[in-house]
Amino acid sequence: MSVQKTLSLIKPDAVAKNVTGSINSRFEQAGLKIVAQKRLHLTRSQAENFYKVHSDKAFYESLCEFMSSGPIIAQVLSGEDAVAKNRTIMGATNPANADIGTIRRDFGESIEHNAVHGSDSVENAAIEIAFFFSGLEIVE
Ligand code: IDP
Ligand code: MG
């Protein structure tokens, strides 16, 4: 294990429910530190670019529409084993299948409107962090 950084997004459904502070508490309780954070509203083309790995999926158009439908919180989480740790506390993609006590179980609405995004590997975390943040904006 080692100290890693991962990209987290609080998605439009959770921002609209005004539960961003509750979600941030989950990260902090798990020992992850929020070392960068900002609120922004993605354009449709920015959402398409961020999710381009899913461009062949049936849900791609709907996902990009959702992700550009309202404000999000983009954040960088830092800590021991941060990529996998964040995936664990997020829970499964479909909130209905997510473990009790996970963010998606407690705040997600559906397989698409599932409250949070988290990078799935150290390599993708670096790419996704660079999509949203400059080095100057990340403060350990
Ligand atoms: P992940 O967010 O758990 O890594 P991915 O498979 O990478 O899941 O999918 C990216 C996002 O696309 C999901 O978080 C969810 O918002 C949406 N999504 C995934 N599968 C479906 C689906 O079957 N229907 C609708 N939306 C989906
Ligand atoms: Mg994913």
Image (spheres, rainbow, N blue to C red):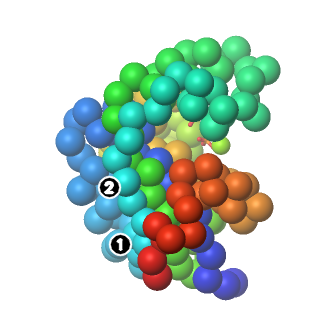
User: Quick check: 15 above or below 63?
Assistant: below
Q: Is residue 5 left or right of residue 100?
A: right
Residue 99, percent across and down? 47, 50
x, y percentage for residue 36? Answer: 43, 66
Up-down relation of residue 80 to residue 48 (above or below): below
Q: Identify residue type, mark 1.
A: Glu
Viewer-proximal residue among 96 and 5: 5
- Report the Cα–Cα distance between label 2 and label 1: 9 Å
Q: Nearer the viewer, residue 44 or 13?
A: 44
Precedes in sequence: disc 2 or disc 1: 2
SS of the residue under disc 1: helix
Quadrant including the N terminus: bottom right
Residue to which mark 2 is pinned: 23
26 relative to 118 in the view: left or right: left
In the image, taking residue 64 as reference, residue 75 lies left or right, namely: left
Which residue does the numbered mark 1 point to in the structure image?
28
* Residue 104 position (above or below residue 35): above
Residue pictured at 54% horizontal, 51% vertical: 132
At horizontal 50% and vertical 18% (from top left) the residue drawn is 65
Q: In which of the image's four quarters is ligand 2 placed?
A: top right
Q: Residues within 10 Å of mark 2 (few under 14, many from 20)?
A: many
Using the rendered image of the protein, determine whether residue 50 is visible from the camera's viewpoint: yes
Three-letter residue code for mark 2: Ile
